[in-house]
Amino acid sequence: MTRIFSIGVLVLWAQSAVAQSAPVPEQVDALLEAIRLRDTVEVMTEESLSYGQEIGDDILAGGGQSPVWVAQLQDIYDADRQYAVMRRVMARELGDRDLTPILEFYGDGVGAEAIALEIEARRALLDQAAEDAAIARLEEMRDDNDPRLDLVEQFVEANDLVELNVSGGLNAEFAFLSGFYTGSGAVAEIPESDILSEVWGREQEVRDSTSEWLAYYLLMAYHPLSDAELQAYIDYSETEAGRALNLALFAAFDVLFTQTSRELGFATGQMVVGEDI
């Protein structure tokens, strides 16, 4: 999950360091509770640990279940640590804004239900069978020209989800490769321009996979909502308050994913070199 191509790894790390030194207003904590950010981070942690184990299976002789590798993954993707990073960045991004309209929307009704459904669907997609079923359902709806697809597309556009996810995903890939070459000791041999070229060469692939994932994930998540309720969510997303929250969330995801991706790349590079010795 992610956003257009802005390789700003050093800037993002600097922003993260600044964010950690600033106090977090009580209203921001109330907002994070309302949108259940901690629950989202916990699901993201499971996703990330699974992804890290897949990398281990593909690259490391000991596989992704190696105790040393699993311990490194658990350090990188510690849920409390990830939540703390996002909390500080969101506090910085939201600044002195009055969060009352956002708290009111997510405190009850469509907002609260939508958040619960998003988390439930994301957790369900940890199971491959559930993901396969969601993809099959998407294809059926496309074959039937189901009008619900248009509503979901409106939601995606209202929140700029494709562009934000694509640029964030490319940032994360750049950070991973930079970390990998540093960890393996090959950073001096690989010009940054080559890393940029490699990452940018995957832009269309990332865009296509992101668009597809958003479609079947959101269809699955919002299935219990009526068209009127989903339209209300779209309308809210287009308000100033809705846009402010969306941008703050993606800024926090950018910092977090860049940080953890670089750490994962560095750890992978070190493990590969260690196995070659």
Image (cartoon, grey):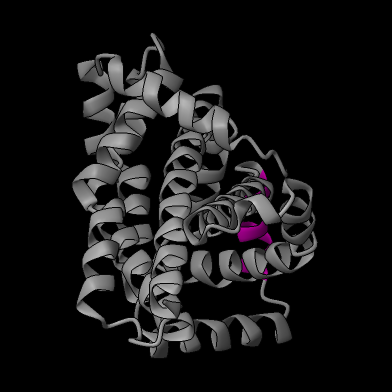
Left or right of 193, for residue 69? left
Q: Which residue occupies the foreground of this view, 254 or 230?
A: 254
Can the viewer see residue 222 in this picture?
A: no
Residue 214's quadrant in the figure? bottom right
Q: Residue furthest top?
A: 96
Which of the pair 138/125 is nearer the observer? 125
- Compared to residue 84, the image places residue 129 above or below, namely below
- Is 11 above or below relative to 152? above
Whether residue 142 is visible to the viewer of this picture, yes or no, is yes
At horizontal 36% and vertical 33% (from top left) the residue drawn is 105
Residue at 37% from the left image edge and 46% from the top image edge: 110
Q: Give the number of callouts.
A: 0
Rendering quarter of residue 234:
top right
The percent coordinates of residue 201 (x first, y second) are 80, 62
What is the chief secondary structure element of the magenta stretch?
helix
Please state, as top left, top right, bottom left or bottom right, where the C terminus lies in the image. Answer: bottom left
- Residue found 64% across the figure and 71% down from its top: 212
Q: Name the residue nearer the viewer: 251 or 21.
A: 21
Horizontally, is 189 left or right of 99 in the view? right
Question: Compared to 118, does 235 lie above or below?
Answer: above
Residue 273, image x, y percentages: 45, 70
Q: In this image, 187 relative to 193: left or right? A: left
In the image, residue 196 sits, relative to residue 8, either above or below, namely below
- The spot of residue 108 in percent (x, y) is 27, 40
Magenta span? 147-157
Where does the image place residue 46, in percent across and percent down from the top left?
29, 67
Residue plotted at (33% across, 19% down)? 100
- In the rendered image, residue 238 lying in the magenta stretch gets the answer no
